[in-house]
Image (cartoon, helix red, strand yellow):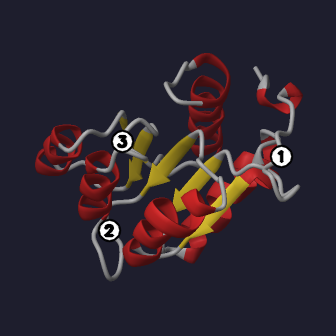
Amino acid sequence: MNSTASLPQKETKMNEPLVEIVLVEDNPNDVELIMHALKQNHVANKVKVIRDGEEAVNYLLGEGLAKGRRPKFILLDLKLPKISGLEVLKKIKSSQQTKYIPVVVLTSSREERDILDSYDLGANSYVTKPVDFEQFSYALNQIGYYWLSLNECPMD
């Protein structure tokens, strides 16, 4: 099901497209796969790619909010340079301005400790990256459909 294609494109005060997804991922191959899968599902033009934890915190708690770019949800890898994904998650969920933004941890880690820590810090979902591209694309389609079309989030 490809319901995200019919979603209206919202605009910010500066007539820039609204960022609906913030992707925090440092691996260029994973970024390329994720963007390809999102493009197949017609949401690639609404994605802000951030490549390290420090940049994610600066964008989500500063620059992005200041420009009225509150995303619909965040796809967050755990293994990031500068600041770990878990630390990014902790900062997002401890801020009044960002604590209600859904965070989907999208990572290759199947470690029980990472899963527990993610949920303890407020992750809304934990998804392990499938190895097969078709499964990966399907998973991202489902994630996008749920968080962009079905989920109701406070303070939208």
Look at the numbered disc 2 and give the secondary structure of its residue: loop
From the image, state whether disc 2 or disc 3 is nearer to you.
3
Q: Residue at x 46, y 39 (%)?
A: 101
User: Circles 1 and 3: CB distance less than 8 Å?
Assistant: no
- Amino acid on which disc 3 is placed: Lys
Under mark 2, the amino acid is Lys
Find disc 3 in the rendering and name its residue.
Answer: 99
Q: Residue at x 67, y 22 (%)?
A: 149
Q: CA distance from mark 2 to mark 1?
A: 32 Å
Give the quarter of the image for residue 54. Answer: bottom left
Residue at mark 1: 11
Q: Residue at x 66, y 26 (%)?
A: 145
Query: Label 3 neighbourhood size at 10 Å, few (<14), some (14-19), many (20+)?
Result: some
Q: Give the SS element for disc 3.
A: loop
- Disc 2 to disc 3, how far (Cα)? 21 Å
Query: Which residue corresponds to mark 2?
Result: 79
How many tags in the picture?
3
Between residue 89 and residue 129, name the one nearer to us: 89
Using residue 14 as the reference point, say whether residue 153 is left or right of it. left
Q: Residue 4: x percent and y percent?
A: 78, 29
The foreground one among 59 and 28 is 59
Q: On the picture, is 91 further left or further right than 12?
A: left
Three-letter code, disc 1: Glu
| Disc 2 + disc 1, Cβ < 8 Å | no
What is the crowding at mark 1: few (fewer than 14 residues within 10 Å), some, or many (at least 20)? Answer: few
